[in-house]
Image (spheres, rainbow, N blue to C red):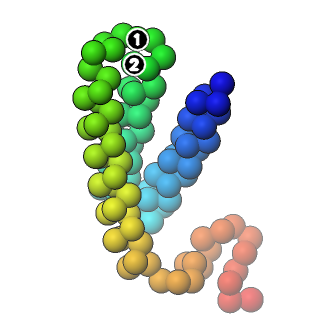
Amino acid sequence: MVINITSLLGLGALLGTVYINKKLGWYWLYVFGIINVILIAANRVIYETGILWKYLPIVQKFTFISVLMWIWILALRSKQLPTALPEGWVKGINPRQ
């Protein structure tokens, strides 16, 4: 039960980050994020169903390395962002008013 709840919360955070990558125009980070979502989903399916169970450790290691690289690249890339949000970033809020 707890694993299912944390998986859903983690999926929400991951999809939110992927959406922000798309909105910022970071195409390759967006694609890399989608690949990570697919890898994490494959981990969950293998874990829950037991299908291809012998490959689970390999898939987990590959997914861990992929997600770690993605987070590292995001951290490096986010240092290039300005500290203020771009105008019109959030609908209805204009930071210059």
Question: Residue 36: percent from the left, percent from the top?
Answer: 37, 41
Question: Residue 48: percent from the left, percent from the top?
Answer: 48, 17
Q: How many marks?
A: 2
| Residue to which mark 2 is pinned | 46
| Residue to which mark 1 is pinned | 50
Residue at left offset 26%, top offset 38%: 62
Residue at left offset 47%, top offset 83%: 82
Residue 30 in the image: above or below residue 1? below
Residue 68 in the image: above or below residue 10? below
* Disc 1 and disc 2 in contact, CB within 8 angstroms: yes
Residue 86 quadrant: bottom right
Question: Residue 32: percent from the left, percent from the top?
Answer: 32, 48
Label 2 crowding class (10 Å Cα cut-off): few <14, some 14-19, many 20+?
Answer: some
Residue at left offset 46%, top offset 52%: 18
Q: Is residue 17 left or right of residue 80?
A: right
Residue 49 in the image: above or below residue 30? above
Query: In the rendered structure, which amino acid carries the disc numbered 1?
Result: Gly
Residue at left offset 33%, top offset 14%: 53
Q: Residue furthest bottom?
A: 96
Report whether residue 19 is seen: no
Secondary structure at badge 2 equals helix
Closer-to-camera residue (78/64)? 64
Closer-to-camera residue (27/51)? 51
Query: In the rendered structure, which amino acid carries the disc numbered 2?
Result: Ile
